[in-house]
Image (tube, helix red, strand yellow):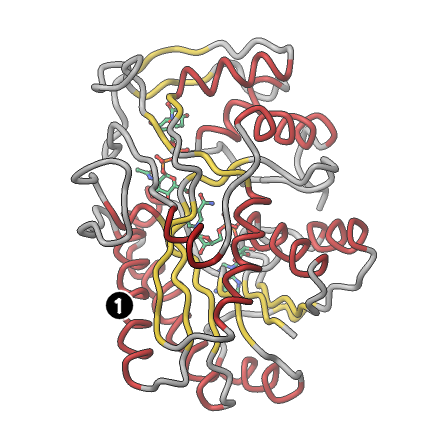
Amino acid sequence: MILVTGGAGYIGSHTCVALLQAGYEVLVLDNFCNSKAESLHRVASITGKAVPLVQGDVRDRDLLREVFGTHAIDGVIHFAGLKAVGESVEKPLTYYDTNVSGSVVLTEVMAEFGIQMLVFSSSATVYGDPVNLPIREDFPVGATNPYGRSKLMVEQIYTDVANSDKAWRIALLRYFNPVGAHVSGAMGEDPNGIPSNLMPYISQVAVGRREQLTVFGNDYPTVDGTGVRDYIHVMDLAEGHVRALAWLKNQTGAHVFNLGTGRGYSVLEMVRAFELVSGRPVPYLISPRRAGDVAEVYADSSKAERELDWKATRDIEVMCRDTWNWQKQNPQGYPD
Ligand code: NAD
Ligand code: UD1
């Protein structure tokens, strides 16, 4: 059985589908601070399998002891954390507490129970402004905000932990820009309030929930002046976790992997792709750059392809189609 912390969230819920379909049993731990139980009902209806849930906080040591003491857990995928860059600048201690202390408490309890296989959600944000493109795992790291630093700190902690005891097997997965939804349209990204990421913003404009997109800058040294990112379909990402788990069985140590497609798209390319797939206009307004943004980011994911036998297969059209399918069927996201 795999313990999935943060399993009710966007990436976690899609990963539960991929795990269940690959024959794993899952147990979700989530405190629902940024998700709803409905996402897990959708996982169950898509897979036809039950999704046992422990509602609680990953920093709650006693609860974790109870979880590990009462379930036959073989490994952990650790998604639980906070991810809003702007909020992390306002509330750094909240971010370090949840993301860093949460990871430490979880890992201590895992060690107590002799469970030493772990997949961790890291982010391409750890590369900051990349020195070159495409970005390889051995490029210099350096975060520019508390959220990014929390991810970097946890990566370093896990590297030290793995060095201290050869029984640890840890995959540090650096996601590029996850987008898209399950092909059924029953599951997708359901951000609270005004979306800060591009894809959910575009789809809310297309469905009529918001008037227009604000494009943050058109004076970058890119194909059309707007920011370029490596968007990756959330189900490709989910399958990357399943591959990483299988691969870890025969490994020791901590290993970093980029999970991206290796291709970048500009903001305006994304807008056009979405308009084409949805048949809806996505009006936009150009505004100044957003603080902290970089011009261009895309991955070299050849290490994951080589080692994990994993490669993203869903293209930009599928990413837009599945996002639109989810948005149309669930214009207000998951019900309470
Ligand atoms: P999400 O907010 O949808 O999911 C995170 C889940 O963790 C939520 O269900 C939330 O309720 C839960 N959670 C938060 N704090 C918790 C706590 N203290 N105890 C228990 N549960 C808690 O976010 P997501 O997009 O699915 O991201 C999952 C992970 O991937 C996060 O660690 C995030 O930092 C990382 N990541 C996300 C992206 C992205 O663009 N979505 C990119 C790179 C990395
Ligand atoms: C952001 C975070 C990053 C995090 C990632 C996934 C910042 C600086 N970085 O990355 O740490 O890992 O989300 O959660 O916040 N854009 C617009 N209009 C919008 C929204 C976005 O033009 O309303 C542009 C951005 O300027 C960027 C691109 O779209 O060029 C993608 O933005 P976004 O989806 O927020 O992702 P990142 O900035 O790559």
Residue in view at x 30 percent, y 15 percent = 223
Residue at left 22%, top 15%? 219
Q: Is residue 248 left or right of residue 158?
A: right
Q: Residue 315 sits in which quadrant? A: top right
Name the quadrant containing residue 84: top left
Ligand 2: image quarter: top left
Vertically, is 225 above or below 317? above
Kind of residue at badge 1: Gln
Residue 5, how many percent across, how many down? 55, 65
Rendered location of residue 102, percent (x, y) = 41, 70
Q: Which residue is mark 1?
A: 156
Q: Position of residue 16 (x, y in %)?
A: 65, 58
Density class for disc 1 (Cα within 10 Å; few <14, some 14-19, many ≥20) is: few
Q: Secondary structure at mark 1?
A: helix
Q: Is residue 165 left or right of residue 53?
A: left
| On-image quarter of the N terminus | bottom right
